Amino acid sequence: MGLNPPLLLTDTDVDALAREFLLSRYLGPIYADWSPDRRLDTFLRRRGLARVADDGDLSMMVLERIMANVSAAPRS
């Protein structure tokens, strides 16, 4: 099993992921009964970002940014 180098995200990267999530279908009624962390995990994995989903610190940073901005998200 090889070692993966640490994955580093800048604040800009975290903001971009949060913004993409907030514009995604994961805020819609289909996922209303899913927890926020489950929604984010699925979003990240479907975007090919399993390493971010698997890194608890990184995914928590993205989730915190999402929660801080969810009230400004467009409503469908």
Image (tube, rainbow, N blue to C red):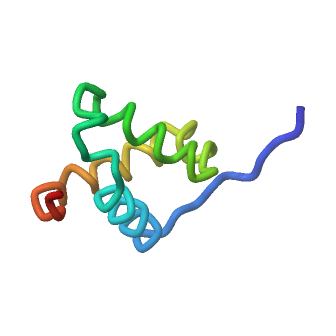
Quadrant in the rendering for residue 51: top right
Residue found at the very far left of the displayed protein: 71
Quadrant of the drawing holding the N terminus:
top right
Compared across the picture, whether 75 is left or right of 45 comes to: left
Residue closer to the observer: 31 or 51: 31
At x 37%, y 50%, the residue is 61
Residue found at the very far right of the displayed protein: 1
Q: How many marks?
A: 0
Establish if 70 lies above or below 2.
below
At x 37%, y 52%, the residue is 62
Residue closer to the observer: 29 or 33: 29
At x 33%, y 47%, the residue is 63
Residue found at the very far top of the displayed protein: 33
Quadrant of the drawing holding the C terminus:
bottom left
Compared across the picture, whether 32 is left or right of 63 comes to: left
Residue closer to the observer: 74 or 19: 74
Compared across the picture, whether 46 is left or right of 29 comes to: right
Q: Residue 41: give x, y in percent of width and height.
A: 46, 38
At x 18%, y 60%, the residue is 69
Q: Residue 12: give x, y in percent of width and height.
A: 42, 74
